[in-house]
Image (spheres, grey):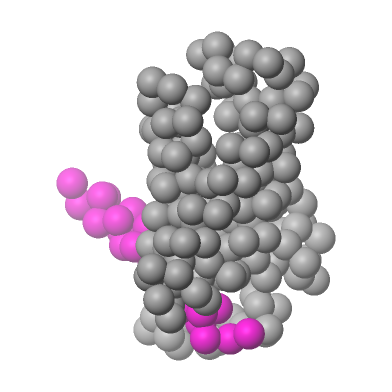
Amino acid sequence: MSGSKPKQSRKGNREKLMSAALDLLAEDQSGLSGISLRRITKACGLSPPAFYTHFTSMEELGLALVSEVGATLRAVLKGVRDAETEAAVIKASVVAAFEYIRGNESLFILIARERAGSSASIRSAIRNEVRKIVEEMASDFQDRGLFERFSLPEKQAAVAAIVSLGLSLIPDLLDVSRESSAEGDALLSQFEFQVQFILSS
């Protein structure tokens, strides 16, 4: 019992550091490279040595955030792929993905910026998470007999094109949604139409 409290505290501090980094990313246009370790620790009331209890570097913190995004987004998408029809799967996947994106804006500001950021490791990690999403979705489609007009490699190519399109849409979606939820919804409807077009080709 007594040994559990330090573990909970360590876990809580790790989450505080990650949350503080995301909050600062939302304010700072320069990306992860423009945020110092001291700014992060000051923002969450921890000391710089406490940072190194959880991360060896800012890059490692960024990798942890990317991993969290990928794992959660894969779970979100998997949870809606039991819809009855192909059209329903497309709609449910688009809605679920972008609800998650809108609800976790700072995480996706990170992804949008770091895809072309200065860290090769973070760029590689983002590509790896995208690859996992593509492979899981295509395999699920194959197993469930969806989009049978495509072979598995064709499903993977189609899903990769959709994910790439979705990633490029994120900055516009976040900007537009802040100004008008209706315009954000219209942008999503347009994306859903594009997805249907890709998967009906």
Res 180 quadrant in image:
bottom left
Q: Which residues are magenta?
A: 1-29
In the image as oriented, which residue stretches furthest toward the left?
1
User: In the rendering, at what x and y percent does residue 170 appear?
Assistant: 58, 63
Residue at the spot 53% in from the left edge and 67% down from the top edge: 173
Is residue 39 at least partly visible in the picture?
yes
Residue 106 appears left or right of 55? left
Residue at the spot 18% in from the left edge and 46% down from the top edge: 1
Query: In terms of depth relative to the viewer, which is nearer, 120 or 1?
Result: 120
Quadrant where the C terminus is found in the figure? top right
- 44 relative to 141, above or below: below
Marker count (numbered): 0
- 38 relative to 4, above or below: below
Query: In terms of depth relative to the viewer, which is nearer, 71 or 76?
Result: 76
Query: In terms of depth relative to the viewer, which is nearer, 83 or 135?
Result: 83
Is residue 63 at least partly visible in the picture?
no
Principal SS element in the magenta part?
helix
- 145 relative to 31, above or below: above
Residue at the spot 41% in from the left edge and 46% down from the top edge: 96
- 68 relative to 33, above or below: above
Query: In terms of depth relative to the viewer, which is nearer, 178 or 104?
Result: 178
Residue at the spot 52% in from the left edge and 86% down from the top edge: 27
User: In the rendering, at what x and y percent does residue 68 appear?
Assistant: 51, 51
Asked if the stretch drawn in magenta spans residue 5, the answer is: yes
Asked if the stretch drawn in magenta spans residue 140, the answer is: no
User: In the rendering, at what x and y percent does residue 28 appear?
Assistant: 58, 86
User: In the rendering, at what x and y percent does residue 115 appear?
Assistant: 73, 62
Residue 89 appears left or right of 117? left
